[in-house]
Amino acid sequence: MKQFEEFRNFVEKSDTDGNIVNSTAKSNDISVDKHEATPDEIMRAAHHKINASLAQELLERILAAPPDFFERLIVNLLLGMGFGGSVAEAGRALGRSGDDGVDGVIDQDALGLDRVYIQAKRYAIGNNIGSGAIRDFFGSLDRHKASKGLFVTTSMFSSSARETAEFLSKRIVLVDGDQLTKLMIRHNVGCRIEETIYFKKIDEEFFE
């Protein structure tokens, strides 16, 4: 494919000088050979690789931070996702750990018409959440007469934990470490846009 020769020369030079693109990159578990792929495919593979590296670094920073940082992180993420209230209100709602089995409550809307109860577990990788923790959280929701809950962890949920959450009568959303970092990247929490690249193509209407 001669038409992309100049672009590939640029990619190969970048690989030699800065190790930006490997000879084979993976995007969504699909191998991309830079000698056969289009420029768009190569850039998407590079973008996927950069985000994967960023996600790993975010998770490492979260695990290394003080315990109360995880609570503030969840506050900022939920606010960034459009849940109601101000930072001050959300901050008061979260971080009130006690004997009631929940780590916090946050309004689902700005008026507080509905609430989401939250359980947050900052566990090391490999220390997975089991079904017992899900049932305990379910019991806490029942005591609060809550219909929905959010369980966030930096580790993972076992298959039995996910199955338990699926079949319980209350809606419990599970967010593991992988999904947590993806949400942080999507909503610019703990990271920021360093550079914006615009890809342009021919405006067909202009030449009609």
Image (cartoon, rainbow, N blue to C red):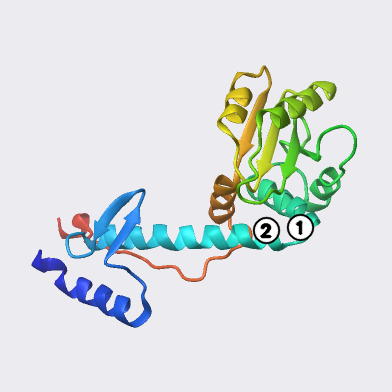
Q: Residue at x 22, y 72 (%)?
A: 7
Q: Residue at x 72, y 44 (%)?
A: 121
Which quarter of the picture shows residue 148? top right
Q: Is residue 15 above or below residue 116?
A: below
Left or right: where 44 falls relative to 173: left
Give residue 54's position: percent from left, percent from top.
Answer: 52, 62
Label 1 amino acid? Phe
Label at residue 196: none
Do tag 1 and tag 2 residues touch (Cβ < 8 Å)? yes
- For numbered disc 2, what is the local secondary structure? helix
* Amino acid tagged 2: Ile
- Which residue is farthest front? 126
Residue 67 placement, left or right of 150 = right
Q: Residue at position x 34%, y 48% from top?
A: 29
Please name the residue that numbered disc 1 is placed on.
Answer: 69
**Relative to the observer, which residue lies in front, 171 or 193?**
171
Residue with the most extreme right position: 99
Q: Residue furthest left?
A: 2
Image-based side of 4 in relation to 106, left or right: left
Residue 179, compared with residue 208, is above or below; it is above
Q: Nearer the viewer, residue 43 or 154?
A: 154
Q: In which quadrant of the rendered image does the N terminus lie? A: bottom left
Q: Which residue is mark 2?
A: 62
